Image (cartoon, helix red, strand yellow):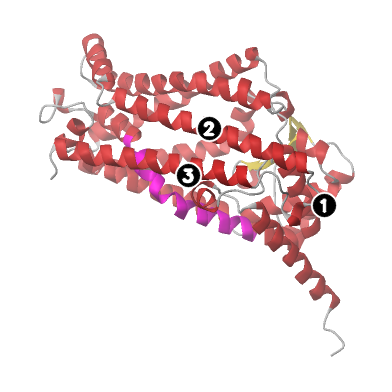
Amino acid sequence: MPSALSATWIILAAVAANLALRLWLSTRQIRFVSGHADTVPAAFAAAIRPEEHARAARYTIAKQRFAIVEMLGEGLLFALLTWGGGIRLVREALDARLGTGFAGELALVGAIFALLAVADLPLEWFRQFRLEQRFGFNRMTPGMFALDALKTALLAIALGTPLAAAVLACMHSAGPWWWLAAWAVWTVFTLALTAAYPRWIAPIFNRFTPLADGPLLDRIGALLARTGFRSNGVYTMDGSRRSSHGNAYFAGLGGARRIVFYDTLIERLQADEVEAVLAHELGHFRLHHVRKRMIAGMLSSLFGLALLGWLSRQDWFYGALGVPVAPNGPDGSHDGLALVLFALVVPWFALFLAPIRSAYSRRHEFEADAFAAENASAAALVRALVKLYQDNAATLTPDPLHSLFYDSHPPAAARIGRLAAEGTDRRRRRAGPGPF
């Protein structure tokens, strides 16, 4: 087993490597996008004006510069909470008031996650009212921002407190295999939250209106019928209250799934383009991408909890992160401390798996595009994507290595090129064999 000191050096090396890699990728993205800002790629020259392409480059560069500030802030906050003694001070204060039992452990988890949320608020404010405002995307008022923050905090308390209590109860009472019980709790919670989200949670923040009867709804109904998809309705969401960005998504499970379009997307796209965007989203369900991702998430959470189960019994784990504990700890428990430290340290190691996750996601996006080309119109999806790239100021020229790590969707040129080929192949199949 490693000593606390050697484990500290391992974690410090992982944090330094994480920050160095992210900084390198961000600077590459800035240089690459800046170097291609003056020339619209040939495939988009007819649809994207030079000034739009240059604006997308400026927006991408601004986001990357902000990301550098964020990552440095994350590193500083992590160091202050761990090696700087922040968690130790919070724990000592809570122990003095609540003792070292279950209530103190639960309070420690809540206090640290509350500190993280509060530390993130200035960054979120800057992102919304400086970065997004600068490029014309923000439609949120300061009052709406504050109300959203309050709603999010209350929701986190209402949902997070019983979840944390249940996991801590498993850690405290379920023996050495507690992590299996905790995994069952986490899985049930995730499924229940997914099912409840469209009906009970999303309306806390946005207004959802059933899509009005008319040609668009008829077209969507025909697409759902020929693809065998059941839903609990088609809705528009008032996303324009907060941002001019557009999107569409599914929410819920089984027959309770809802199809949701941002009102900005409905306003911007033609009926056949909306149909093509929906066909892409349907592709994720019909090709079982959603199920596969849920299973992958469940397996990764099982592995993570098993790892936590082992680490929570290692005294060096606590000492390596600046919170040394006596063997077996006060009252035989440091469950809340283990949970907090694990949640803080895992992201610093997880980045190195990002290319695998991104490649898996991009493959699903290509497959969903092919499904859309088969069941709607490849040309309409291309037009819709180009409009979305325009409206969202998404760069058409990302750095390949940065994209490899971060982009869950294929680069614009690759995606459009494959869709164009899909459309050509489909027309050839419809035309049948040639005369020779």
Q: Residue furthest right?
A: 215
User: Is residue 275 found left or right of 150 in the rendered image?
Assistant: right
* Alpha-carbon span between mark 2 and mark 3: 11 Å
**Nearer-the-camera pick, 74 or 398:** 398
> Residue under circle 3?
25
Q: Position of residue 365 (x, y in %)?
A: 61, 55
Disc ID at residue 380: none
Residue 65's label in the rendered image is 2
- Between residue 176 and residue 250, name the one nearer to us: 250
Part of the protein shown in magenta: 345-367
Question: Dot 1 corresponds to which residue?
Answer: 46
Q: CB under 8 Å between callouts 2 and 1?
A: no
- Image coordinates of residue 262 in percent, x first then y, are 73, 35
- Foreground: 157 or 150? 150
Using the image as rendered, state which of residue 276 and residue 286 is in the foreground: 276
| Badge 1: residue crowd in 10 Å (few <14, some 14–19, many ≥20) | few
Question: What secondary structure is found at the residue carrying circle 3?
Answer: helix
Separation (CA) of disc 2 from disc 1 = 30 Å
Answer left or right for 424 relative to 183.
right
Task: Of the two numbered discs 2 and 3 on the same chain, state the one appearing first in sequence.
Answer: 3
Residue at screen point 36% across, 30% down: 75
Instruction: Estimate the x, y position of residue 85 in percent, counting from the top left.
Output: 24, 20
Tell me if residue 40 comes above or below residue 84 in the rendering.
Answer: below
Q: Quadrant of residue 376?
A: bottom right
User: Label 2 is placed on what type of residue?
Assistant: Arg
Q: Quadrant of the N terminus?
A: top left
Our reading of the magenta stretch's main secondary structure is helix
Q: Residue 266: where, in percent of width, then height? A: 80, 38
Task: Determine which quarter of the picture holds residue 127.
Answer: top right
Q: Residues under labels 3 and 1: Cα distance?
A: 31 Å
